[in-house]
């Protein structure tokens, strides 16, 4: 799917994740895409890394699906570059669509218009620390 508007990206991402479609997911990222992920120790570099991550993630779900929802989406764009940021929720659901668990993050996407449409060149996700936890260590 070639995105003609960068604001279509979150919906395309949600559809690829829900369908567990590794190829559709991978196509949303530029060949040289880079990501700092909340859960990954090392950054993701290149489309192949996104493909491998998606294959592992989707394969680990079994019969479950993941519903992705963005809220408070903000965008800014020029002719060939756009940024989006939002709060994003990943909610696992069973085969009946019943919620199982969820996690919320903050996300920023930088997109570029390439010959195939808008794709992410950089992604950054984070989760806020609880107030008063910064600098504390676990015992």
Image (spheres, rainbow, N blue to C red):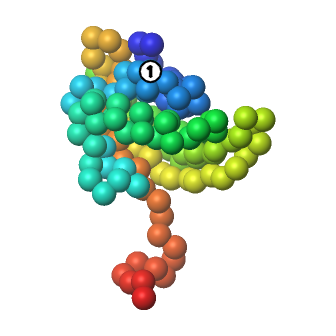
* Residue 35 versus residue 52 in the image, above or below: below
Q: Nearer the viewer, residue 114 or 13?
A: 13
Question: What residue appears at the point 43 percent right and 26 percent down from the top-left corner?
Answer: 22
Q: Is residue 6 left or right of residue 80?
A: right
Q: Residues within 10 Å of mark 1 (few under 14, many from 20)?
A: some
Q: Work out whether residue 11 can be spotted.
A: no
Q: Is residue 26 above or below residue 4?
A: below
Q: Residue at x 53, y 29 (%)?
A: 20
Q: Please name whichever residue, 21 or 46, is drawn nearer the observer in this view of the structure.
A: 21
x and y percentages locating residue 89 in the rendered image: 58, 46
Q: Position of residue 17 (x, y in %)?
A: 53, 32
- Left or right side of 44 for 8: right
Question: In this view of the protein, can residue 30 be seen by the observer?
Answer: yes
Residue at 69% across / 41% down in the picture? Answer: 93
Give the residue drawn at x 48%, y 82%.
132
Q: How many discs mark residues in the rendered view?
A: 1
Q: Quadrant of the C terminus?
A: bottom left
Front-most of residues 36 and 95: 95
Q: Is residue 101 left or right of residue 125?
A: right
Residue 84 in percent (x, y) is at 43, 37
Q: Secondary structure at mark 1?
A: helix
Q: Quadrant of residue 30?
A: top left
Q: Which residue is mark 1?
A: 24
């Amino acid at each position: 799917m070639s995105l003609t508007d960068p604001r279509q990206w979150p919906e395309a991402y949600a559809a690829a994740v829900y369908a567990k479609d590794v190829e559709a997911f991978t196509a949303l990222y530029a060949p040289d895409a880079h990501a700092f992920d909340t859960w990954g120790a090392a950054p993701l570099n290149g489309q192949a890394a996104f493909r491998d991550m998606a294959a592992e993630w989707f394969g680990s779900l079994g019969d479950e699906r993941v519903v992705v929802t963005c809220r408070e989406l903000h965008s800014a764009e020029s002719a060939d570059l756009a940024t989006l940021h939002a709060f994003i929720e990943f909610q696992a659901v069973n085969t009946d669509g019943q919620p199982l668990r969820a996690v919320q993050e903050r996300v920023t996407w930088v997109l570029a218009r390439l010959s195939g449409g808008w794709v992410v060149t950089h992604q950054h996700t984070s989760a806020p620390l609880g107030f008063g936890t910064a600098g504390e260590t676990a015992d």
